[in-house]
Image (cartoon, rainbow, N blue to C red):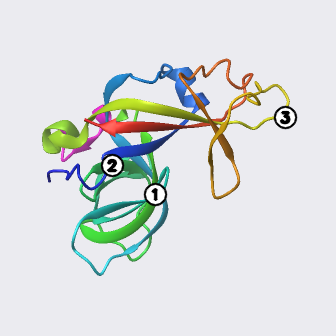
Amino acid sequence: MTFNKKAIEIFGVNCGTLSLREYEDYYVGDTFGSALTFISIQMEPSQSATRSLKKLDINYYEGVGKIFTIDDYGSYPTLVFDCGIYAFSINRLPKGIESGSYVKMRFYLVFDEDRHWQLRVNGERISKVIPGMVYDWRLKDILIWAREGEKGEKYFENLPVAYVSPKGEIYKRIRGTNARQDTGGYDTNYILICEML
């Protein structure tokens, strides 16, 4: 399916410092390729068979599309969700939902850090079966969850507030991540504002 870039072209993608310590830091202006994984918050059968995607918050989405079980990863299957973009997750389908059915889902997105290369569909690499699963991105902005006052964390009091989440979490704008230094070794969250190229 061809993604309609007029629907959404700027995505807020979650990222944690623990993940970045394993890979590499990001800087505003970076371009890179990555598939998406999803963190499902709510999934239910859909009455609609029309794929759609809408942004509910800066980093929170609602989509209607087909959900497929494609592979086993240990004791958990790999799910692929096609709502006009592709995203995958290592998780079980909820009871009452079968592979190949349409679902309505609310979810967060995360870059997959190249795990998709390990996925297979009937023994074939997922990149051969779903060649459009890796997207090109340009990083436009970086927001960090500034938990000011926490022991061992770097303070961000001189930076203006860029975003306040529905839970009251305060995010501030930075030019680049520094996963080993930003929080003094504690895990925190970033929201990467990315343009799909």
Mark 2 neighbour density, 10 Å: few (under 14) some (14–19) many (20 or more): many
Q: Using the numbered discs, state the Cα–Cα distance from disc 1 to disc 3 in whole angstroms.
A: 30 Å
Verify CB contact (< 8 Å) between mark 1 and mark 3. no
Residue range in magenta is 116-125
Residue hosting label 1: 107
Marked residue nearer the N-terminal end (3 or 2): 2
- Residue 64, quarter of the rendered image: bottom left
The numbered mark at residue 87 is 2
SS for callout 1: strand
Measured from the top left, where is residue 175 in percent x and y?
Answer: 54, 23
**x, y percentage for residue 197?**
25, 35
Q: Is residue 151 magenta?
A: no
Q: Residue at x 74, y 27 (%)?
A: 158
Mark-to-mark CA distance, 3 and 2: 36 Å
Residue 71 appears in the picture as rendered: no
| Crowd rating for badge 1 (residues with CA inside 10 Å; few <14, some 14–19, many 20+) | many
**What residue is shown with label 3?**
149
